[in-house]
């Protein structure tokens, strides 16, 4: 029986016919639109705490310790959800898992909004985190597996634009609700319950969406897989692509892939290490410090309380702009080149934030200069790094282990996120803005080296072509 570490047994790749526009193009667009509601929920549910925490603390009598627990428990839930979601997705299917996650989003959102005490709120926040983590693992894989190779970059990164749009929407909705109902002690409940609407839309929409054709083929359901491909490809492209998918799925079934044992295979282990490092370095940029604590950071920089809330919306807005730019570039620039540029830019802006905080005299202009460099950092990260992390994680792993391996890597991503979430406020309090951002700059330098030395190139290759290439090179 062949091993997964041996040379490929699949027939040589032949160029696929072009995927010409037609009704299937609109169907593929609808599939991507519905699935990325999972990204919208990811963004909203992680961003909403930024504005809800103040009134929540007053209403539920949170102490410093319970406040930290309520904020961070979603992140720990997301780490668990990433691993569990990946395994469930591999076993039962991508579409099935997204439907399950939509149900968890609905129940946990309502539970958070109605929670009478902070322990109840913490329980439902943890469940919400499980859904967030599961969505962060499953949705990019689903999109990568239904997308043609030449459109995979732009389709998968639509999920990233939905994530940052969700965060931006949370900042805007928080500001509106606070201005309209700010006198109510339970105003934070209104902020939280809004996300039940996209959760319902995700549940209803996914009922009409197809399963991943690559997952169906891995389950020996080739007729179903071909039927799905014919929904989202031209007829001749569907037939040609199905032959490639079928050959690789057969090879992987023979190789008995799909779990921890595969980490003993050198080329798979290498890809998992690369994926985990991508997730960790993406978080060590400090982006979620801005998403979770942007208002508090800007107050430390010199803004008033109200001014910081308004100014913080710029981070969300330019995050959206950054992802739009990233989508425009992602199919035109090699992945590794784009990642290197991104780490270089964020390192530059981290240094500029630190130097501005350290060297500029206190004045009315100083907070705005710091804000400008922070916004430039967010724009650069979301334009060059944020979309690429999720895209590469969805591309680099072999089919049968794809969700399992992505779950492990996203687990590491969320654990790093949790560490940054805990460490950022006391670090700024103890060291100040400048040294904190110099630390982030050092992490950016590591990112540049990693992108140049370790990250493989995937642009313009089918998932099957890339897999065969890595197997041949590193076995």
Image (tube, grey):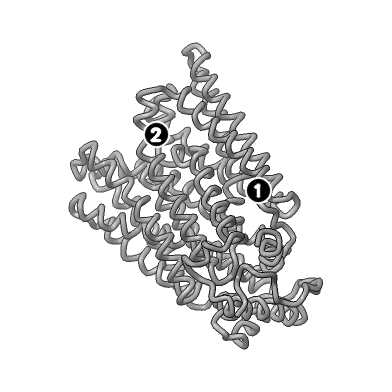
Of pointers 1 and 2, the one earlier in the residue sequence? 1
Relative horizontal placement of residue 217, taking residue 114 as reference (left or right): right
Q: How many marks?
A: 2
User: Which is closer to the viewer, label 1 or label 2?
Assistant: 2
Residue 64 coordinates in the image, percent (x, y): 24, 36
Residue 210 appearing in the image? no
Relative horizontal placement of residue 120, taking residue 256 as reference (left or right): left
Write down the residue under mark 2: 424
Write down the residue under mark 1: 326
Mark 1 touching mark 2, by CB under 8 A? no
Q: Which of 12 and 221 is in front in this view?
A: 12
Residue at 55% from the left image edge and 38% from the top image edge: 378
Q: Mark 2: give few (<14), some (14-19) or many (20+) Cα within 10 Å.
A: some
Task: Using the image, determine if residue 128 lies above or below residue 347.
Answer: below
Q: Residue furthest front?
A: 1
Residue 390 appearing in the image? yes
Residue at 46% from the left image edge and 36% from the top image edge: 312
Residue at 30% from the left image edge and 47% from the top image edge: 188
Residue 305 coordinates in the image, percent (x, y): 37, 29
Q: Nearer the viewer, residue 162 or 349?
A: 349
Q: Quadrant of the N terminus?
A: bottom right
Residue 318 sits in quarter? top right
Relative horizontal placement of residue 64, taking residue 76 as reference (left or right): left
**Callout 1 secondary element:** helix
């Amino acid at each position: 029986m062949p091993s997964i570490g041996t040379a490929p047994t699949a027939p040589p790749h032949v160029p696929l016919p072009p995927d010409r526009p037609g009704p299937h193009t609109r169907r593929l667009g609808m599939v991507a639109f519905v699935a990325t509601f999972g990204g919208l929920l990811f963004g909203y549910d992680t961003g909403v705490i930024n504005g809800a925490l103040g009134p929540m603390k007053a209403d539920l009598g949170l102490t410093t310790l319970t406040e930290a627990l309520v904020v961070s428990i979603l992140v720990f839930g997301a780490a668990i959800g990433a691993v569990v979601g990946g395994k469930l997705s591999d076993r039962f299917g991508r579409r099935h898992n997204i439907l399950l996650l939509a149900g968890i989003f609905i129940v946990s959102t309502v539970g958070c909004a109605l929670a009478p005490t902070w322990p109840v709120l913490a329980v439902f926040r943890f469940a919400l985190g499980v859904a967030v983590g599961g969505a962060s693992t499953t949705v990019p894989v689903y999109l990568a597996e239904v997308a043609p190779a030449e459109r995979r970059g732009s389709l998968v990164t639509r999920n990233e634009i939905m994530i940052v749009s969700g965060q931006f929407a949370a900042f805007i909705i928080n500001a509106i609700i606070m201005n309209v109902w700010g006198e109510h002690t339970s105003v934070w409940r209104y902020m939280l319950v809004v996300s039940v609407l996209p959760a319902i839309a995700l549940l209803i929409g996914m009922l009409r969406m197809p399963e991943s054709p690559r997952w169906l083929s891995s389950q020996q359901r080739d007729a179903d897989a071909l039927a799905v491909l014919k929904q989202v490809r031209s007829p001749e492209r569907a037939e040609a692509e199905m032959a490639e998918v079928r050959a690789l799925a057969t090879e992987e079934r023979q190789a008995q892939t799909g779990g921890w044992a595969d980490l003993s295979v050198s080329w798979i282990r290498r890809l998992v290490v690369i994926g985990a490092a991508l997730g960790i370095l993406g978080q060590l940029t400090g982006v979620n410090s801005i998403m979770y604590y942007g208002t508090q950071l800007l107050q430390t920089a010199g803004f008033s309380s109200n001014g910081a809330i308004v100014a913080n919306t710029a981070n969300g807005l330019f995050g959206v702009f950054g992802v739009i730019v990233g989508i425009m570039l992602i199919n035109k620039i090699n992945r590794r080149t784009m990642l290197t540029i991104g780490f270089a830019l964020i390192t530059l802006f981290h240094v500029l934030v630190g130097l501005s905080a350290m060297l500029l005299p206190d004045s009315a202009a100083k907070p705005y200069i710091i804000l400008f460099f922070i916004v430039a950092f967010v724009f650069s990260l979301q334009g060059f790094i944020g979309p690429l992390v999720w895209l590469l994680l969805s591309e680099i792993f072999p089919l049968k282990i794809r969700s399992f391996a992505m779950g492990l890597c996203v687990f590491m991503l969320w654990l790093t996120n949790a560490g940054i979430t805990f460490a950022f406020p006391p670090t700024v309090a103890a060291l100040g803005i400048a040294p904190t951002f110099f630390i982030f700059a050092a992490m950016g330098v590591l990112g540049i080296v990693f992108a140049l030395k370790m990250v493989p190139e995937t642009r313009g290759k089918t998932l099957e072509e890339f897999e065969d290439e890595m197997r041949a090179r590193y076995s």
